[in-house]
Amino acid sequence: MAYNKDLETREVQATWDVTTYQYKLDGRGAKVLADGMKEKTIRGIKCPQCGRVYVPGPTYCRVCYIDIDDVVDCSDEGVVMSYCIEMADVRGNPMDEHRVSAMIKFDGADTWFIGTVHGIDPMDVKIGMKVKAIWKDVTEGNLGDIQRFEPV
């Protein structure tokens, strides 16, 4: 997906308290991802019927509704699919430095992963730009093993 500067974008002047949301991850899919992260590898689960790759992987394909268990490796590079420039914390207090939270689609995956993008002026981040995961030196097998994403 290439960046198209002619697409309309919107700026929303509001706060969004993400701490009020609860998330549930399938245990097996989380373990597959965590085991890969310990080795600095992005792992997902692939549907044998439609070929869709989920990161992290569920126990069944959300399209075909069949059980899935084929573990596949994906690239730790991907594309920014959506992003938000954070100018305030979850309580609405201004931040000293703006932060970019982005939804990233890893190469080889069909689902999106959230992370922060560094190494670029927040106003220069674009949908469709390539980014790469920057890993901690010593990984532990959890989501914190990816420190951030940076432009390729």
Image: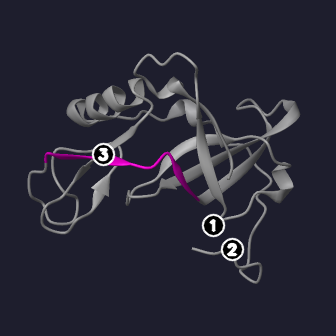
Above or below, 62 against 142 in this view is below
Q: Residue 16: which quarter of the image?
A: top right
How many marks the image carries: the answer is 3
Q: CA distance from mark 2 to mark 3?
A: 26 Å
Q: Magenta segment: does it hold 132?
A: no
Picture disc at residue 128 = 1
Query: Residue 151: percent from the left, percent from the top?
Result: 70, 51
Give the residue pinned by disc 3.
Answer: 44
Q: Main secondary structure of the magenta part?
A: strand
Q: Amino acid at mark 1?
A: Gly
Q: Which mark is residue 33?
A: none
Residue at x 27%, y 44% (from the top left corner): 57
What amino acid is labelled 3 in the image? Answer: Gly
Residue depicted at x 31% and y 26%: 35
73 part of magenta stretch: yes
Picture residue at 76% right of the left edge, 31% below the top: 89
Helix, strand or loop at mark 2:
loop
Mark 3, secondary structure of its residue: strand
Q: Quadrant of residue 18?
A: top right
Q: Are marks 2 and 1 in contact (CB under 8 Å)?
A: yes
State the quadrant of the N terminus.
bottom right
Tell me the tag on residue 3. Answer: 2
Between 22 and 97, the residue placed more toward the observer is 97
